Image: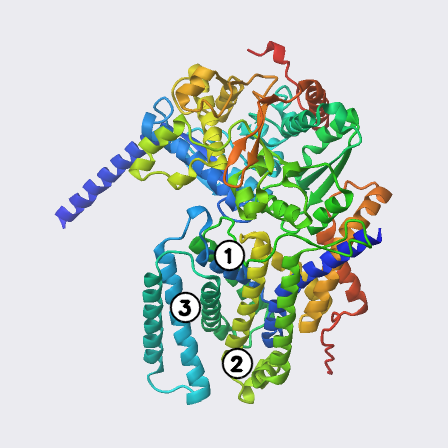
Amino acid sequence: MRLGKAALLGAAIAAAGLTVAASAQAQNEQFIPGLVYRTGAYAPNGIPFANGVADYYALVNERDGGINGVKILYEECDTGYATDRGVECYERLKNKGPTGAAYFNPLSTGITFALTEKAPVDKIPIISMGYGRSESRDGSVFQWNFPLLGTYWSAADIIMQHIGLKEGGFDKLKGKKIALVYHDSPYGKEPIALLEERAKMHGFEFMPLPVTHPGVEQKATWLQIRQKRPDYVLLWGWGIMNSTAIKEAVAVGFPREKIFGVWWSGAEPDVRPAEGGAKGYQAAMLQHGSGQFGVHAELKKYLYDKGKGVAKWEETDEVLYNRGLVNAMLGVESIRTAMKKYGNKPMTGEQVRWGIEHLDLSAARLKELGFDGMLQPLKVTCSDHEGTRAGRIQQWDGKKWVVVSDWYQSDDKVIKPMVDAAAKKYAAEKKLPVRDCSKES
Amino acid sequence: MLGPFLETLIGGLLTGVLYSLVALGFVLIFKASGVFNFAQGAMVLFAALTVARLTDEIDGKALGLEHFVIAAAVLGAALALVGWYAWREYVARGSGPGERRRLALLAAGGALIGGVIAFAYGKGAWPLWVALAATASIMGLLAYAIERLVLRHLVNQEGIILFMATLGIANFLDGFGQTLWGSDIYTINLGLPKDPIFLFEGVFPGGLLIDPAELFAAGIAAVLVVVLAVFFQKTRVGRALRAVADDHAAAQSVGIPLNTIWLIVWTVAGLVALAAGVIWGAKLGVQFSISLIALKALPVLILGGFTSVPGAIIGGLIIGAGEKLSEIFLAPILVQAFDLAGGGIENWFAYMLALIFLLFRPQGLFGERIIERV
């Protein structure tokens, strides 16, 4: 009996020891939440993105032992692309880990809108790479939002520049009709302001055509396109809405070469279901496209050869998987930047916010990280939370995406005044303090 | 103006036929059991996913052999069970001793044969007709499982309890279907012409556009309606179905086997879901959103009545045409007249249209008018 008690005591001490060790290890972990959607209407697009993110964090842990020795603790929460579930996930995950969530990637403009007011209170930055509020690039007002790599105003402007170039100059757009088929949500409505501005500047007729969630019923929209015969159609869809739009374009005989999607309408799941019908369709690129680059060799060596990758290897060259990699890399590099100032330990949301705002990725650093060829250098500042405004156009040739344009830079002469006005209005409405970026280091 | 109007009307009517197909599944189950089957949309998705994945070979991403073996095993088991059921009902006229063991042996034998066939077939994509047969069997098996595991235990319960049970089934099927077959967008290729047909090009500039895929769907729906109408009106089972719908207990008291009737009706609803799933899947691609199409059937049901097959068809046509015409012709007028923010109106307009009809005919266009005397 006595022996039994001793054994029990020993076991308890051992268990306590293990708990203490595990706790000490947990204290040196950087918690990063992932708002993903692996189920629901938008899963075909959500899954490859989520796989890219998960694989990159796993690569940093496997290859480098974490960020400067601090292991990444990553946890996904499935939002189903629903704003209410996104907020629920945010509330559940924001305080996890020794220092709380480093940042959130909402992967939904609707969720980004909802979290924009929560982020300053909880002091957690929101990285909305290639989506979210366009005016949130103004860091003097939106201190906690980072629409890195490009906003929807940048995307729409890049597409308009490409159309203008094809037509032989913006002046040739006078009298033409340009339709926008958009997801009837905050996401789909974002480019309207920019396109209205461009329509005013160049004298083309702008036709916004909404499509209700999830976008499987577009007959009325495409019958209108057939009847009003626009010269170009811009597509601001997500998930099954994109492939449905292309199929409906086939059904009404609208030439696919005259349809331009945003970068969220330009991935493999958007065109493959339309089979041969998608050939000729074009879309903006959030800098990167499909294909394998330096980072993929590392992924193969440290994850896929060991059976640790989340995706199938043959799917790791797809557009959305690559976007997941890019998104995760920007987050990791922001934490690394913050560590330079605050030390190699788990960062708080506030410290990571500083890191994102001082993110400076040169061409050499991008090459070192294995992202050369995917991204151009970017530098985030207090007044510019976008970091870069470059993009290209790609075209589906029936089997793969092919880059068909040179690099464009969205025109800040058009966009900057719009950003300033919208940000000022937002600050006044919400009674937010406005930072003087000239005094920020 | 007449050309665009007619084109929208035709397009709307053809889309309406597709709504009717989904609504038919709801009507069948409601007619026979008084249950509003919330799982109908999930059944459409499940059936479409099964067909798509069994025939699938998109970009070389073929399924693993194990999926085909499982599906074929289910097909074999289902065929064996259906055979056994037919034998018990129509030959032996009732159950006998050792039935459970015989049933298990039959199912195992069927599964083994199905599995062996699949193994012999290899992992290549199945021909469409084999996939359709397998999926029809799987839908039958699903109906059997639903009757055996859920409905049988809820006989004579309140309608709301049965409705809640179907909510559970819907969630299970949505998740299980995607877990089993994946959540990507898959294609079903029926070999239909994709290029539009233009009619009366001499009368209207540009002609009137018709989508051949929708014409095909309308043909399928018409055949289904005729078959179902004959089934309900002319067969012994059809009359029994209607009796069960009126009163479970009374139907049982005169010897109508309630469980058998439920099994039959859920199987038929499963087959209607298969037809709807294949047609919608061929049109849109097979993906989770297909299950949301079920929501499109709700205004159709409100309008057509929950118990009328012709009501589902006419309701579908009115809703289909109404929402397309409203989106194209009414929405711009409303936006301009009231300085609205804009946005699609077709989704909510369908419900408005149905509710307006209800003001005049609370039982729906073809619904049965129930008079209860106290």
Of badges 3 and 2, the one in the foreground is: 3
Local crowd size for mark 2, using a 10 Å CA cut-off: few (<14), some (14–19), many (≥20): many
**Residue at the spot x=72%, y=78% of the render?**
B370
**Residue at the spot x=49%, y=48% of the render?**
B184
Residue type, label 3? Leu
Q: Would you say B317 lies left or right of B281 here?
A: right
Using the image, determine if residue B142 lies above or below residue B193: below
Q: Would you say B15 lies left or right of B331 here?
A: left
Residue type, label 1? Asp
Residue type, label 2? Leu
Q: Would you say B166 lies left or right of A152 here?
A: left
- Cα distance in 3D space between marks 2 and 1: 27 Å
Callout 2: SS: helix
Near-viewer residue (B84 or A422):
B84
- Cα distance in 3D space between marks 3 and 1: 21 Å
Mark linked to residue B258: 2
Local crowd size for mark 3, using a 10 Å CA cut-off: few (<14), some (14–19), many (≥20): many
The disc numbered 2 marks a residue on which chain?
B
Task: Work out which quarter of the rendered image holds the C terminus of chain B and state it.
Answer: bottom right
Using the image, determine if residue B288 lies above or below residue A318: below
